[in-house]
Amino acid sequence: MPIILPKEFFQDVYDVLEENVEASHWEREDFVDYFINNRGNEFYFCSNLGPGGAFNNQGGRIYLSCNPEDKTDEIYSTIENVNEILEEMLVDYMTNFKRKKKDG
C-alpha cells in the first residue's frame, strides 16, 4: 500500500532524482501525477540507473530500485545514497506533519 503524500513532496522527490540519478526532466509531471492521482506504488523512469530504474512507494517506505542485471557497484552505491536521502525526507515530512496536526 502506498503512502499518501502531497504533490509538493513528490515534486521534491523528483528534484532529488534529477540531481542524483539524472532523471529526465520531461517525466516530472507524469511522475507527480502518477502518485497523486493513481496512487500507484512503482514508477519506472529514464535515468542513469538503466532501463529498469524505479521509484517505489509501498509498505510504508519510499525507495529506488533497478533491475538486477543493471546493478553495478556504482549504481548500487548511488541507490543506497539516494535511498538514505529519501528516508530522511519522509521522516522529516512525517515528523512535521504530526507536529502541525498536534499544534492544530
Image (cartoon, helix red, strand yellow):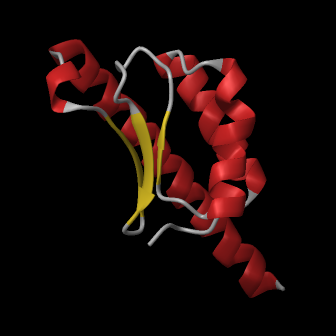
* Percent x, y of residue 61: 40, 60
Q: Does residue 104 appear left or right of residue 40 in this picture?
A: right
In screen coordinates, is 34 left or right of 104?
left
Q: Residue at x 69, y 39 (%)?
A: 30
- Determine whether 51 is above or below 101 in the image: above
Considering the image in quadrants, where does the N terminus appear?
Answer: bottom left
Q: Nearest the camera: 74 or 39?
A: 39
Q: Is residue 70 left or right of residue 35?
A: left
Does 36 sit above or below residue 102? above
Q: Residue at x 57, y 30 (%)?
A: 16
Please identify the quarter of the rendering in which residue 83 is found.
Answer: top left
Relative placement, left or right, of 81 versus 99 is: left
Task: State whether residue 29 is above or below residue 94.
Answer: above
Number of numbered discs? 0
Residue 62: image x %, image y %?
A: 44, 53
Which quarter of the figure is the C terminus placed in?
bottom right
Q: Tell me where residue 90 appears, x and y as whole percent.
A: 53, 56
State the residue in front, 74 or 84: 74
- Whole-percent x, y for residue 67 in the image: 24, 31
Residue that appears at 53% across and 68% down: 3
Question: Is residue 5 placed above or below 45 in the rendered structure?
Answer: below
